[in-house]
């Protein structure tokens, strides 16, 4: 027949095993949760970076288009002035 000490010893052993299992499961859950959080953070950062790159590219394209449009406008005005001066000179020639 088991004594009270035997029962306490068995209960302590069961509690230690149970506690160890609970700690192991908690650690595993925490690692999984942390991994999921890291994965989600990485995904968000990649999406954010892609959006930033897209916005920068769009701004650069608009800016480049504006610069090209301004250069073309200046060139057309300058060309028109040159043509007008040539016409003026030609009209004054005999």
Image (spheres, grey):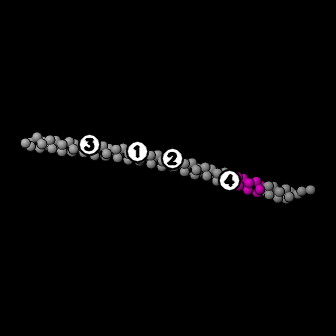
Lower position in the chain sequence, tag 1 or tag 2? 2
Label 4 vs label 3, nearer the camera: 3
Q: SS for tag 1? A: helix
In magenta, the rendered stretch is: 15-27
Kindly report the distance in space between the C-alpha atoms of the residues bearing marks 4 and 1: 45 Å
Label 1 vs label 3, nearer the camera: 3
Kindly report the distance in space between the C-alpha atoms of the residues bearing marks 2 and 4: 28 Å
Q: Magenta residues: mostly which secondary structure?
A: helix
State if disc 1 and disc 4 touch (CB < 8 Å). no
Give the residue displayed 83% in from the left and 57% down from the top.
10
Kindly report the distance in space between the C-alpha atoms of the residues bearing marks 2 and 3: 39 Å
The circle on residue 58 is: 1
Residue corresponding to mark 2:
47
The circle on residue 73 is: 3
Lower position in the chain sequence, tag 1 or tag 3? 1
Location of residue 76 in the rendering, given as x and y in whole percent from the top left corner: 24, 42
Label 2 vs label 3, nearer the camera: 3
State if disc 2 and disc 1 touch (CB < 8 Å). no
Residue corresponding to mark 4:
28
Kindly report the distance in space between the C-alpha atoms of the residues bearing marks 1 and 3: 22 Å
Q: SS for tag 2? A: helix
Lower position in the chain sequence, tag 2 or tag 3? 2
Location of residue 37 in the rendering, given as x and y in whole percent from the top left corner: 58, 50
State if disc 4 and disc 2 touch (CB < 8 Å). no
Q: Quadrant of the N terminus?
A: bottom right
Q: Nearer the viewer, residue 1 or 42?
A: 42
Q: Nearer the viewer, residue 70 or 45?
A: 70
């Amino acid at each position: 027949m088991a004594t009270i000490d035997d029962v306490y010893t068995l209960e302590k052993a069961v509690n230690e095993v149970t506690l160890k299992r609970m700690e192991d499961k908690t650690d595993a859950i925490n690692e999984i949760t942390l991994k999921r959080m890291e994965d989600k953070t990485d995904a968000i950062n990649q999406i954010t970076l892609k959006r930033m790159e897209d916005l920068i590219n769009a701004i650069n394209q608009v800016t480049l288009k504006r610069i090209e449009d301004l250069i073309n406008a200046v060139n057309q005005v300058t060309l028109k002035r040159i043509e007008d001066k040539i016409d003026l000179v030609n009209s004054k020639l005999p």
